[in-house]
Image: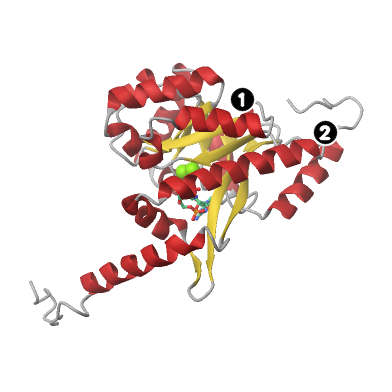
Amino acid sequence: WAKAAGGATYSFYDGPVAQRVQRRHRLNVLLRQALERGEFHLHYQPRLDIRTGHVTGWEALLRWNQPTEGNISPAEFIPVAEESGLILEIGDWVLRQAVAQQASWIGQGLCPGTMAVNLSPRQFRMPNLSRQIAEILALHAVEPESLELEITETALMEDVSSAREILSEISRMGVKLAIDDFGTGHSSLNYLRDFPFDRLKIDRSFVICLGHDSQQEAIAQAIIVLAHALNLSVVAEGVETESQLQYLGANQCDEIQGFLFSRPLPPAECERLLRDRQDIATMPHTRASCR
Ligand code: C2E
Ligand code: MG
Ligand code: MG
Ligand code: MG
């Protein structure tokens, strides 16, 4: 297979496949040190109620600033960590960090809403996941209802019956569950019925098409109707334009997330945003509570 279709010849040692293998190997080595050396941090992207514009919650997104390589995208390193199993330690760190952040915001009198954390398939298969979550919540005295876990369809596929059991356990604790990137994986509509999800996140690939591709629009509309019929609230990810926002509002989408309102932000900027908005929320005649 040394000869590529274009006629160029690659040797095993420097072809694109080998380069990818080497890059993954290198990332693996670097990832092992990243936790101990404190190279990870979290950014948080707000989620907004489409009707009121209020911040309803945040999604914690992992950031890796590697001293020699610079910023490496989670889209690149999460799969590597998933493959090596290191995701278990990294995922535990993310959960702890996000819940601690939530506790700190609540302690400052801010109303952050729910904190959503992405769970990888491998974490999801840990037998003691719900115990780990309960322990972290108790440690920071955070209500289970203010934590949300985002899970993709792929994570559910591997072992459907144990997945259902784990999710039910977590859901009974009061922790919220969201199905992430909906519409991109092997979407089985049964998942929506059989798993105790609270929220569905429509993948960005559908949002991008709003206003351009009537077939993708039809699917997005149908997803919203279906989700509501099954008692799930709907978030659109990756909202970048006013016209997408308008389209989603007209089609009863509940919440939005995306660069149109805000990129994922470092904690200090999140706090500023919460404070600015809180001024409005605590004016007379508006509800002063966090909910
Ligand atoms: P995701 O969970 O679907 O997260 C949404 C991604 O879309 C984030 O990319 C976010 O920065 C990006 N995004 C949000 N709004 C917009 C927008 O308007 N336009 C565009 N172009 N992008 C937008 P990010 O932070 O690079 O994360 C990529 C993926 O990496 C995440 O997709 C998630 O699957 C994974 N990931 C990130 N952090 C974690 C983590 O702590 N644990 C696990 N297991 N996975 C994570
Ligand atoms: Mg997510
Ligand atoms: Mg997503
Ligand atoms: Mg996505």
Residue corresponding to mark 1: 145
Residue 123 screen position, x and y as percent? 40, 39
Residue 111 screen position, x and y as percent? 75, 35
Direction from residue 241 to residue 76 in the image, left or right: left
Residue 219, quarter of picture: top left
Name the residue located 82 percent from the left edge and 36 percent from the top edge: 109
Residue corresponding to mark 2: 281
Quarter of the N terminus within the rendering: bottom left
Q: CA distance from mark 1 to mark 2?
A: 21 Å
Please state which of the two labelled residues, at mark 1 or mark 2, is closer to the viewer.
1
Q: Secondary structure at mark 2?
A: helix
Quarter of the C terminus within the rendering: top right
Whether residue 237 is situated above or below residue 139 in the rendered picture: below
Counting the numbered discs, the total is 2
Mark 1 or 2, nearer chain start: 1
**Residue 261 in view (yes/no):** yes
Name the residue located 35 percent from the left edge and 34 percent from the top edge: 125
Whether residue 190 is situated above or below residue 204 in the rendered picture: above
